[in-house]
Amino acid sequence: MRPGFKKAAIYAAVISAAIAAEIAILHLCFDREDEEGPQAMRWPVMGTVAQMTSRRHMDEREFGELLVCVQASYARVEKLLSAWNPESELSRLSAAGCTNWTEAASPEVRPCYEAALRLAEESGGAFNPRIGEKLRALGMGRGRYSRFDLGAIAKGFAVDMAAEEVERAMGGRYFSFLLDLGGNLRAVGAGEWRTGVRNPFRGVDASQPGICAVITLLGGESVATSGNYERFVEKDGKRLSHILDGRTGEHVSGIAGVTVVTPREYGATLADGLSTTLFVMGPEAGAAFLKRFYPLALALWIPDDPASPRIIVTPDMAYRLERIEWPAEKTR
Ligand code: ADP
Ligand code: MG
């Protein structure tokens, strides 16, 4: 087999595994108070799977109209921020040698660039959207057309944009939706949802439970997960994380997964960006970082230690968990 083809085949396998895994997590989101059962729609977008779930069966036409709003938001973000499409605004700015990204970007997506650059500054470069160059050098950015990488935050941003559209369209009326874009979830409107944290070791050992904890998500909150099990690269039989330490360019090891819950005022953008940042930082530095910059965010780390599975949580996250399968430690 030509080496290029083999690489492409492996890549395709990894992508389909990632999509299958994401579908698996979608099934774990269930609803608390519904008698009628939720109404849901799922479709592929931005290299992943999106889902929109309504708590109570709403009028089909109304659900359809809101679905169009959500799909249009994702499509706009993809058109502007995709690193895989050479025609996206991000790719074109990159090709033109852009340096002042926030100024050059369309006003609609400017907050996404701003959030990414702010996180980079606050985290001392652990989160680093300029990692795109490095990813390409490592062969992980194949097909990418941008030096600036918003892959760690753009999906969360798209969810926030869609949530705003839905809120605007619904005016003051009652509604309750769960938006999910590749594991970036936001509870829009009223009501609580529950979501499972997937067991990252399940792939290696099928006797393990499918989920290791259940998180309650309140109306307006978002949750995001970064893991080394959905997308990764393999080198010499070793699985390497697709997340790099933005300060050194090294693959991050030691953590199998991070889940972050954020309140309405931070949104899904920060849940997404923070999950990647806290994956790089680990529990100790990560908890100190949250205390200083994002005190309202809750976080959970799963150390990459299948022999003794455990979770490490910030004190407030501990109150959100039900059905914890493993021993839990708290950060200070
Ligand atoms: P997902 O693959 O589920 O979107 P993340 O939200 O954690 O997971 O984003 C990971 C992506 O972020 C990588 O594929 C890469 O494009 C980018 N990335 C990797 N390391 C960093 C980093 N240190 N800072 C910012 N972005 C990063
Ligand atoms: Mg992220």
Image (cartoon, rainbow, N blue to C red):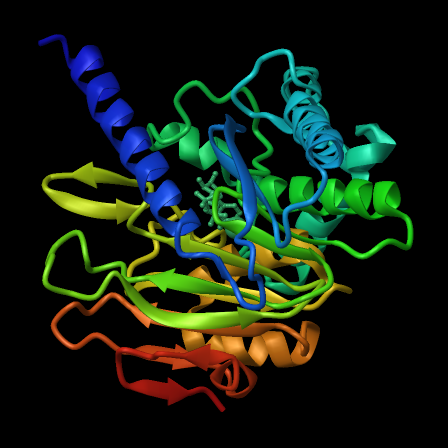
**Please, is residue 284 above or below residue 56 in the view?**
below
Q: Tell me residue 174's x, y (percent).
A: 81, 57
**Please, is residue 266 above or below residue 47 in the view?**
below
Looking at this rendering, what residue extends furthest in the right direction?
172
Q: Tell me residue 240's x, y (percent).
A: 25, 46
Q: Tell me residue 241's x, y (percent).
A: 31, 48
The reply to whether residue 113 is visible in this rendering is no
The image quarter containing residue 55 is: bottom right
Residue located 33% across and 41% down the image? 231
Q: State which quarter of the image contains the N terminus.
A: top left
Residue located 43% across and 48% down the image? 26
Residue located 40% across and 56% down the image? 28
Residue located 35% across and 50% down the image? 250
The reply to whether residue 58 is visible in this rendering is yes
Q: Nearer the viewer, residue 69 or 117?
A: 69
Image-based side of 251 in relation to 99, left or right: left
Q: Tell me residue 209's x, y (percent).
A: 21, 66
Q: Nearer the viewer, residue 46 or 168?
A: 168
Q: Nearer the viewer, residue 124 or 242?
A: 242
**Please, is residue 292 above or below residue 281 in the view?**
below
Image-based side of 244 in relation to 289, left or right: left
How many tags in the picture?
A: 0
